[in-house]
Image (cartoon, rainbow, N blue to C red):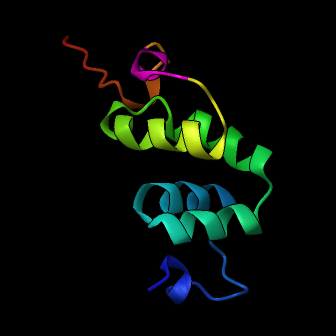
Amino acid sequence: MSIYWNIKKNSDIDETTMIEHTLKYGDLDDIIELFKRINNDKIKEIWLKTMAPDRRFLKLNLMIARIFFDMNVEKDYFESLDNARFKVRVSVK
């Protein structure tokens, strides 16, 4: 079953959320469908900004980089990315 089954054609879901959600939780067919619907450069831009630095998705990011973006990278590429979005900031006063 496709991840798109519950999204209306004129849905208000923003493109960034749709791309990130599909890459994280979709199956291979869903990801292929995403690349048919949205420009590869746009997907890569959002992936690099929102998902690639997230070390929780290291194996998935390796697969996406190698298969969908034809990148010749290893896990250290992702470990070197700034993970600022996911850092916890604690201040003690």
The secondary structure that most of the magenta stretch takes on is helix
State the image coordinates of residue 90 (x, y, percent, origin top left). 25, 19
State the image coordinates of residue 66 (x, y, percent, origin top left). 56, 37
Is 39 within the magenta? no
Residues drawn in magenta: 73-79
State the image coordinates of residue 9 (x, y, percent, origin top left). 70, 87
Q: Name the residue at 49% across, 82% down.
A: 2
Quarter of the image with the N terminus in it: bottom left
Q: Above or below — where is 59 with respect to 35?
A: above
Q: Name the residue at 40% across, 33% down.
A: 54
Looking at this view, is 13 or 19 the one in front? 19
State the image coordinates of residue 82 (x, y, percent, origin top left). 48, 17
Specify whether 9 is left or right of 50.
right
Q: In which quarter of the image is residue 67?
A: top right
Q: Name the residue at 53% across, 44% down.
A: 64
Q: Name the residue at 47% across, 42% down.
A: 63
